[in-house]
Amino acid sequence: MRIGIDATPVLLRSAGVKTWIWHWVENLRRAAGVDDVVESFPSIGLTTRLVHEGSVLGPLATWVHLGLLYAVNAPGNVLLDRLARPFDVVHLSNQVRRLPRGTRVTATVHDMTCWLMPELHTAANVKADREFAERVLKQADRLIAVSENTRRDAMRLLDLPPEKIEVIYSGVADAFFDAKPRESRRPYVLFVGTIEPRKNVETLLDAWAQLKPSLREEFELLVAGPEGWGAERTMARLRAIPEGVRYLGYVSEQELPSLTAGATVFVYPSLYEGFGFPVAQAMAARVPAITSNLSSLPEVAAAGSVLVDPRSAEELHRGLELLLTSPELRRKLARDGYRQAQEFRWETCARKSLAFFHGLR
């Protein structure tokens, strides 16, 4: 079977979707049978490296591929049809705005925040996601959802039939399962994510400030992630260096496993996640987590975390205090979380995805 993967998110500044498509393509190729061919556009090879702050390709190659993306989205242009013709199925990203003719088409539903919480996105993102849903998600032959919660939200909000969407969990890179803790001057609590309203760092800072001074002296809160949209107030607070808080900025994919494994507690009070890579990565690194009791996060975290209402600084504060003062509970959650993380192996995701594609025949 010839499978074409639209991988254009690797040309853009992106976090979760870029991580997903990068590892997904790599593992699809590893899992492919002798009669399977998996090709991506642009090609993701062994010589390229996953970075989130920009394109994985050089400037010239990036502009050439972005120009082609612009061309295939142009009304009346038959280039997409020609590019798709050699494949039995084409899997589209959210950068493509129409379906190619003459081949089967699939796509992935990553989350539904632009419908459920449009105020947490730019107007341009909301418009783009809704356009993608109307022109691709509703018209595609079948869809992958990265969690059961995302599947249910997509069915309800887009009026999609249940048989059209299959849940295939995302994966966690092997580096997190094998990570060795990095050295640190003192124990730390870790948050990883883009600094934007949906990640809810403001409430985390409020909860941290409520901790007993003795805990803030013993533990440090490390905030890792690039500045996103609507982050001016949060960034001002981080740059003011609150007591016991250190802002690390963007942390590379290569450094992230050891940083995660070195944390005493991982905290992630996001207001909505389609899957929640950071929590799954923390569990794979044997780190107990505190995360939100909303969206897909209880489904992904299961017994490996303490669940809290992310809108309540008081509840988040109590969760932090509970874990920071309970070594035995931390050990239990770390064990349970590591077992749960076995569900999120990329090789499993790739195997199920290939079966999904073969099911279109």
Image (spheres, rainbow, N blue to C red):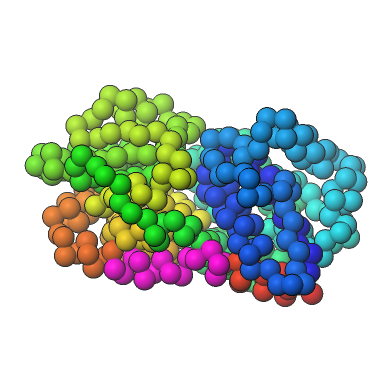
Residue 269 appears anywhere in the view: no
Q: Relative to the observer, which residue lies in front, 12 or 318?
A: 12
Main SS, magenta region, reads: helix
Image side of residue 143 versus residue 262, left or right: right
Which quarter of the rendered picture does the C terminus lie within? Answer: bottom right
* Residue 270 on the magenta span: no
Which quarter of the rendered picture does the N terminus lie within? Answer: bottom right
Residue at x 54% of width, y 50% of height: 19
Residue at x 75% of width, y 46% of height: 97
Outermost residue to the left: 214
Q: Relative to the observer, which residue lies in front, 18 or 157?
A: 18
The quarter of the picture where residue 128 lies is: top right
The magenta span reads: 335-349
- Residue 39 lies, in percent from the top left, at 74, 56
Q: Relative to the observer, which residue lies in front, 288 or 300?
A: 288
Residue at x 63% of width, y 45% of height: 47
The quarter of the picture where residue 359 lies is: bottom right
Image side of residue 167 versus residue 292, left or right: right
- Residue 197 lies, in percent from the top left, at 43, 38
